[in-house]
Amino acid sequence: MYQLHTEVFSLLLAIPVLVFLWSRKLAAHEHEYPPLVRTSIPWIGNAIQYAYNPIALFERCRLQYGPVYKIRLGGRHVTVVSTSETIASVYRDHGKKLNSGEQNMWLFNAVADIPVANKFIYEVTDGMLFPIIADCLSKGSLMTFTSDFGKHAVNFIEEMLSTDGGTILPLVDLVGEVMYKSTSLAIFGPLFPLSSHHDFALLDRNVHLIILKIPFVAQPAIKARERLLAQVVEYIAEGWREEGDGYIEGGSELASGCIRVLKSLKLSDTDVGAAFLSFMWGIHAMSVRSVFWMMAHLLVHGDALQRVRQEIDKGLGEEPDRLKSLLAEGPQALDETRFPLLDSAIKETLRQITVTGGIREALFDTEIRGSDQAYLIPKGEFVLAYPRAQNHDQRLYPEPHKYKVDRFLDPDTGKILDSLARINWGGGAHLCKGRHFAQFSLKCVAVVCLHFLDMSPLSGPDGAIMYPKMSPRSVGVLQVDEKWRVHVQRRKRGDGGT
Ligand code: HEM
């Protein structure tokens, strides 16, 4: 009897131990360390390839190591995740263990020369400025900006048309400038120096060179940054009024609110200007690049252009000046119920041009979940979302390399399908705060240009259409091809053509 008791007791004791050991074994299998990409260069690791052609590096690694793998970038370990589940897991970040501070630091250091050691500015931007942007550009508040944006976009094109005859010019000088100037006037007001556009374009095109600290070649962009900063500091000095809580004359509450916060922190004028410059870069960069690619895709796909133009003509009807009155109605005037094909064109463009999403630092050991596996990111390492892999997955998008303007339209109902496309606006706490405004402005520039202008891409010596060059060195979305030129003239009514 005594022996039976002992055996039962030992068994009871053994069960929890066995369960514990078994669960440890399961846990070890449940989350694994991502495979480390082999490289023969110590410390630098994959940094050179990453600098020169991140897309090629990511594609090669994905084929060799699967959808989640770890690369080494100059002493940093970065896990690249490229499935929808792992990207969603990074963006959701349930345990709040992933931090975007380092990403902002690299960017703001490059675009506004804010010293990396100045952690305070990064915290202020993330904790105080981003919420103001989110609030001022929420769907319900957009009206304040959209009618102004529309009015300025129309004026810009009408002014351009006052010169007779057609002209040949880089596409980005047309649509990038409409985007930059209309956004600046709508948000920053009439005192903002619109001539800053060229320096902004020079800086944005070369941001990667500054981030990589490549000597000499980055110099023109660094000079452009200095000039931009001086202009921004002057704009704030001239436009700031102390009455009430303080405001920028003629500027929106978005501009005034951000400057008010920066001034209240007793920062120097240069620091206020630098923080404002990084905020300004965030507002313009992705939109200017996206509008370039959207229009370029439409122009090289004549049938897509024809269909979008028909949709716009139908939406505007016959009434003269309908465009102006429509834009004055507010953001809903251009929503997807009126222009579904244009909406799909934007989603298809972002699908094609989005390269990388957010990069985060693990503040603690963090688990990233995939559909059937979890990966462990040790504290201090980084994780980078690579949505381009999902955007080019042929199981999700048949013929992924083709630009299909109606890809995001339900063939039966004609309504927008957007669940997959959302990934290109980020997600979770860092979801793009300007997405409603960005979508409106992209649509608005397309509508205004296609309503007033006939545009066509130039042909090469062999008579074939020349395509814009895709720069492999892009951060976020693809850089524009600043040399890609188009023929532009006042639209001839009734021909329906390009
Ligand atoms: C087509 C244009 C745009 C695209 C494709 C885009 C895309 C994105 C993406 C993918 C993120 C997430 C980054 C991350 O996860 O770290 C993001 C964040 C952000 N975007 Fe945009 N964006 C665009 C335009 C704009 C505009 C016009 C504004 C402001 C007016 C804006 C403001 C922001 C802000 C403030 C964040 C940071 C959010 C945070 O970290 O809390 N974006 N954007």
Image: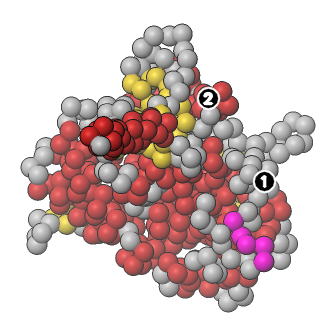
Q: Secondary structure at mark 1?
A: loop
Could you tell which of marks 1 and 2 lies nearer the N-terminus?
Answer: 2
Mark 2 neighbour density, 10 Å: few (under 14) some (14–19) many (20 or more): some
Q: Amino acid at mark 2?
A: Tyr
Report if residue 227 is visible in the image: no
- Tell me: residue 216, above or below residue 496: above
Left or right of 436, for residue 187: left
Residue 250: x and y in percent read 29, 69
Residue at numbered disc 1: 398
Which residue is the extreme one toward the front? 1
Vertical comparison of 39 with 31: above or below: above
Residue type (three-letter) at the residue carrying disc 1 = Pro
Quadrant assignment for the C terminus: bottom right
Dot 2: element:
helix
Q: Is residue 444 magenta?
A: no
Look at 55% across and 22% down and name the residue there.
37
- Prevalent SS, magenta region: loop
Q: Which residue is mark 2?
A: 65
Q: Residue at x 63, y 43 (%)?
A: 389
Q: Residue 252 lies in what quarter of the image?
A: bottom left
Q: Position of residue 187 (x, y in %)?
A: 36, 65
Q: Residue furthest right?
A: 462
Q: Name which residue lies at 26% across and 32% down.
A: 116
Q: Is mark 2 within 8 Å of ligand 1?
A: no
Pointer 1: residues within 10 angstroms few (<14), some, or many (20+)? few
Instruction: Find residue 223 and report its horizontal and vertical position in percent.
Output: 38, 31
At horizontal 50% and vertical 31% (from top left) the residue drawn is: 34
Q: Which residues are magenta?
A: 408-412
Camera-side residue of 60 and 64: 64
Percent position of residue 426, x then y: 47, 54
